Image (cartoon, rainbow, N blue to C red):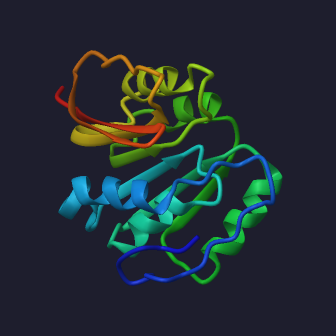
Amino acid sequence: MRISAGMLKGRRLVYPRSGLRPTKDITRQGIFNVLGGAVRNARVCDLFAGGGALGIEALSRGAALVVFVEKSLKVISCLKANLAGLENVRIIRGDVFRVVPKLQDTGFDIVLADPPYHQGLADRTAELVATNRLVKIEGWLVIEHSRQETVRVPNGWIVFKQRSYGETAVTFFRRQE
């Protein structure tokens, strides 16, 4: 897997041999095509970061800071390898549902989330991010999830767009209040 655009275009990413479902190139490209210029100078949080493809793609496209949240120590070792030599990054090891309340009112411009499929985590993540005001007003929450899952719109948010890529769906939310 490689970064698809920006100053890190072509950078190879490493992943553990099993247990992860990295975001496919076409899905990543679609996400960042929708976000467009919103990424430049943005403060970004990558939840369920895995090997960091989404957050590193944001850095490559000009994000000012990316905070990666990942629970697995084994996966974090790959994430650290993928972030080698990069600045303006922070890794937080922990369960997203315990870490996010500690980041309450942080005011990220963009939160990217790729929770495990078929466990109801996409819906829980949307509510968690909204409840803890992790995103500033007019900011973005982008959740990658299974097409079979629906993600409820949190109060004070709108669905800006939804895209499908095979069995994967991506829902783009914007915070309104």
The location of residue 116, given as percent across then percent down, is 62, 35
Quarter of the C terminus within the rendering: top left
Q: Position of residue 130 (x, y in %)?
A: 37, 25
Viewer-proximal residue, 94 or 160?
160
Q: Residue at x 48, y 71 (%)?
A: 88
In the rendered view, does 165 fall on the left or right side of 81?
Answer: left
Answer with the quarter of the image where residue 118 lies.
top right
Residue 164 vertical position relative to residue 158 in the rendered view, above or below: below
**Left or right of residue 17: residue 42:** left
Residue at the extreme front = 166
Q: Give x and y (percent) for residue 125.
A: 49, 27
Q: Residue drawn at (71%, 74%), measured in percent from left and top?
A: 81
Q: Is residue 86 above or below residue 102?
A: below
Above/below status of 14 relative to 146: below
- State which quarter of the image contains the N terminus: bottom right
Q: How many marks?
A: 0
Image coords of residue 141 (percent x, y): 34, 39
Left or right: 24 as drawn, with respect to 31? right
Q: Which of the pair 50/117 is nearer the observer?
A: 117
Q: Residue at x 24, y 54 (%)?
A: 35
Residue 26 image-quadrant placement: bottom left
Q: What residue is shown at x 52% (from left), y 42% (from top)?
A: 114
